Image: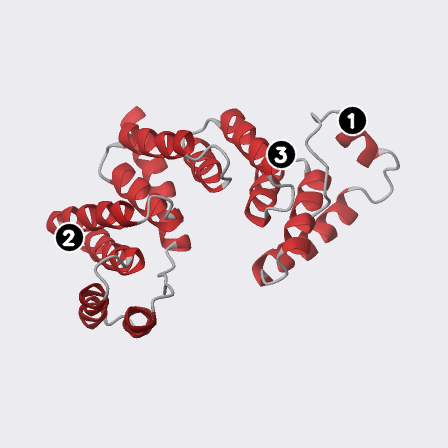
């Protein structure tokens, strides 16, 4: 039973990588061009050609962390889809090469954490993200990635605490407010979830999926509380307060 549960959790967390795996382009003029071409090839499903472009970007700029991340993410996708251990090992090496060049590369931390979970090393995934959070206590990104990991393994309280800390540091962080909205929605606190989602949209309006969710949630709330005066205030009164400074 526990093995089945752990496998389901791993699959859910790995699924997040598929959702959030976005190749990065970077800002180096020459290497940037190769990264752009590689990303186009990746999106077209031409993975071998994409790898060639990313390798070219590394040759043009050996310190280009984005190129190493792009190669790692490509090998990771290939390894995960074909259960190819060699590809997964290569992805892990490249993720670490990326972090050697940019110790704050959020996408790389996420990808490597997913890879560690995927290969039955969740403890190392937690260690990786905790270490990042300790090294950059003023950054919201490690808190949010660590919160994501805790949430997927069922510790929603610790996940919530980390998201609250991120919002305290930056009340106008779109990712933090969106994460808070997801946690609140999971807990059935629809009005509070809507408030968090709206803050996230106010900060970053380029989130069409979130705009659609807000519209759907507004409809759900209107239907749920139709003819029930006081329901909103009752729900909010039973919820612990969260930072509200700097409305999102």
Mark nearer the viewer, 2 or 3: 3
User: Between disc 2 and disc 1, whose residue precedes?
Assistant: 2
Q: In this rendering, would 12 be left or right of 139?
A: left
Instruction: Out of 2 and 150, give the one closest to the viewer.
Output: 150
Label annotation for residue 87: 2
Q: Position of residue 72 (x, y in %)?
A: 24, 54
Q: Is residue 146 above or below residue 28?
A: above
Q: Is residue 46 above or below residue 189?
A: below
Residue at x-position 38% and y-position 65%: 27
Circle 3 residue: 168
Look at the numbered disc 2 and give the secondary structure of its residue.
Answer: helix
Q: Are marks 2 and 3 in contact (CB under 8 Å)?
A: no
Task: Examine the image and state in which quarter residue 142 appears.
Answer: top left
Q: Position of residue 166 (x, y in %)?
A: 56, 36
Calculate the distance from the C-alpha at mark 2 to the C-alpha at mark 1. 51 Å
Q: Position of residue 247 (x, y in %)?
A: 73, 45
Quarter holding the N terminus is top left
Residue 1 visible? The answer is no
Residue at x-position 31% and y-position 74%: 33
Instruction: Out of 132 and 219, give the one closest to the viewer.
Output: 132
Label annotation for residue 128: none
Circle 1 residue: 237
Q: Is residue 248 above or below residue 229?
A: below
User: Between disc 2 and disc 3, whose residue precedes?
Assistant: 2
Residue 20 visible? The answer is yes
Residue at x-position 21% and y-position 68%: 60
| Mark 3 surroundings: few (<14), some (14-19) or many (≥20) residues within 10 A | some
Calculate the distance from the C-alpha at mark 2 to the C-alpha at mark 3. 40 Å
Instruction: Give the total number of marks visible in the rendering.
Output: 3
The colour scheme of the drawn protein is secondary structure
Calculate the distance from the C-alpha at mark 1 to the C-alpha at mark 3. 21 Å
């Amino acid at each position: 039973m526990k093995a089945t549960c752990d496998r389901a959790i791993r699959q859910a967390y790995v699924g997040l990588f598929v959702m959030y795996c976005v190749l990065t382009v970077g800002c180096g003029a020459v290497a940037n061009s190769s990264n752009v071409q590689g990303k186009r090839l990746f999106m077209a499903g031409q993975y071998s050609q994409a790898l060639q472009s990313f390798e070219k970007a590394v040759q043009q700029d050996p310190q280009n962390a984005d190129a190493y991340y792009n190669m790692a993410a490509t090998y990771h996708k290939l390894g995960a889809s074909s259960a190819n251990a060699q590809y997964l090992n290569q992805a892990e090496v490249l993720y670490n090469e990326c972090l050697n060049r940019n110790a704050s590369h959020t996408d790389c931390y996420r990808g490597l954490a997913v890879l560690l979970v995927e290969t039955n090393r969740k403890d190392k995934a937690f260690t990786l993200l905790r270490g990042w959070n300790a090294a950059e206590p003023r950054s919201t990104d490690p808190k949010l990635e660590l919160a994501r990991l805790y949430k997927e393994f069922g510790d929603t309280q610790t996940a919530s605490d980390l998201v609250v800390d991120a919002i305290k540091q930056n009340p106008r962080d779109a990712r933090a407010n969106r994460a808070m909205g997801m946690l609140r929605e999971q807990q059935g606190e629809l009005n509070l979830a809507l408030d968090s989602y709206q803050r996230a949209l106010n900060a970053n309006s380029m989130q069409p999926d979130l705009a659609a969710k807000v519209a759907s949630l507004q409809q759900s709330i209107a239907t749920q509380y139709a003819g029930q005066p006081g329901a909103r205030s009752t729900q909010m009164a039973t919820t612990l307060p969260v930072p509200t400074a700097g409305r999102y």
